[in-house]
Image (tube, coloured by chain):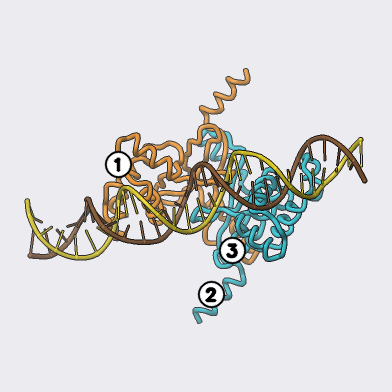
Chain colours: A cyan, B orange, C yellow, D brown
DNA sequence: TTCCTAATTGAAAAAGATTATCAATAAGGA
DNA sequence: TCCTTATTGATAATCTTTTTCAATTAGGAA
């Protein structure tokens, strides 16, 4: 089901601002904060209020069409979410983000932790940080 | 090594505000945002500027004496960090946070993802969300 | 202990980020 | 094409976080 269908299915309208935000996220390689989405919209010549960006991102998040990426320093940004549960690797060099799946790989750990703590676990957050191939090369060049 | 020693070791002074913030985090069961730390300090009768809270938390984070906990809606808060690498489970009911270790359990997944993506992974973020034993009971009671 | 110096603090102001308000607009069914 | 209602966007209000800078204080030296 396309994001447009999901939106309508959930009782929301398919509007210009929502289209613009989705298009921008779709073209972005790195996660974007609201103000960055706003700026890109302006650069692309779209007229779009900052408030709409906030509202749209909140809505898309609620519908799981976008996901939050957390940075170690404490801020967070939005990326497009593929259907299904995914995790992200974030490049510390260029901030590029790539998805990967593997929720099953956590099953053993989840079970162990439930056992040990008595918590009932129903969700998790997993992100990897590192360097993408391009940034690894850049670093290698700089040193040599 | 105590946090006091770590601080001094790193070239910082052991001051009243830093002591207060550490004491508050030490007594907290749930993660605290800066304004919450500030309020508790006031309640405890301590005089302490909000700016110092921000500065102190940033410093403690840098020294790995505290850790960030991320909430799914996008905000983050601070908890005391035990020495060594730990992860957290956060109760969606009462926000209580408990630490658990198990970085090794991610080794297989990390290796697989490095292989598949070509990224060089050097850090990760893992958190579980769920209900603590007390909140499970509370829910059970409410239903019955 | 007392003095000295540099790190640290705190108050106020500035800057940024987010949310509320509400009249004007536009989506999409009739 | 028209109508109804969700949605938008400009402004203002609120929070949150950072800067700035004079006053304070920690901790080594005398």
| Residue carrying label 1 | B47
The image quadrant of residue D28 is bottom left
Using the numbered discs, state the Cα–Cα distance from disc 1 to disc 2 in whole angstroms. Answer: 47 Å
Placement of the C terminus of chain B among the 4 image quadrants: top right
| Residue carrying label 2 | A139
**Residue A95: image tag:** 3
Locate residue B14, reporting x and y percent. Answer: 26, 52
SS at mark 1 in the image? loop
SS at mark 2 in the image? helix
Give the chain of mark 2: A
- Name the residue located 72 percent from the left edge and 61 percent from the top edge: A46
Q: Is residue B136 visible?
A: yes
Locate residue B101, reporting x and y percent. Answer: 48, 46
- Name the residue located 56 percent from the left edge and 35 percent from the top edge: B92
Locate residue B24, reporting x and y percent. Answer: 36, 40
Locate residue D25, reporting x and y percent. Answer: 22, 51
Label 3–label 2 contact, CB within 8 A: no
Q: Badge 1: few (under 14), some or many (20 or more) residues near its Cα, within 10 Å? A: few
Question: In the figure, is residue D26 to the left or right of C11?
Answer: left
Residue in the foreground of this view, choosing between B96 and A36:
A36
């Amino acid at each position: 089901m396309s994001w447009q269908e999901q939106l309508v299915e959930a009782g929301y309208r398919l509007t210009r601002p929502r289209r613009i935000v989705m298009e921008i996220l779709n073209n972005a390689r790195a996660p974007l904060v609201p103000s960055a989405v706003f700026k890109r919209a302006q650069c692309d010549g779209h007229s779009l209020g900052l408030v709409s960006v906030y509202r749209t991102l909140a809505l898309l998040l609620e519908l799981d069409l976008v996901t939050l990426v957390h940075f170690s320093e404490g801020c967070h940004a939005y990326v497009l979410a593929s259907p299904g549960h995914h995790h992200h690797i974030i490049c510390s060099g260029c901030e590029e983000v790539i998805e990967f799946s593997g929720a099953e790989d956590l099953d053993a750990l989840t079970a162990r932790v439930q056992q040990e703590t008595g918590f009932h676990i129903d969700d998790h957050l997993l992100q990897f940080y590192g360097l993408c191939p391009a940034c690894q090369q850049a670093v290698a060049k700089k040193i040599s």
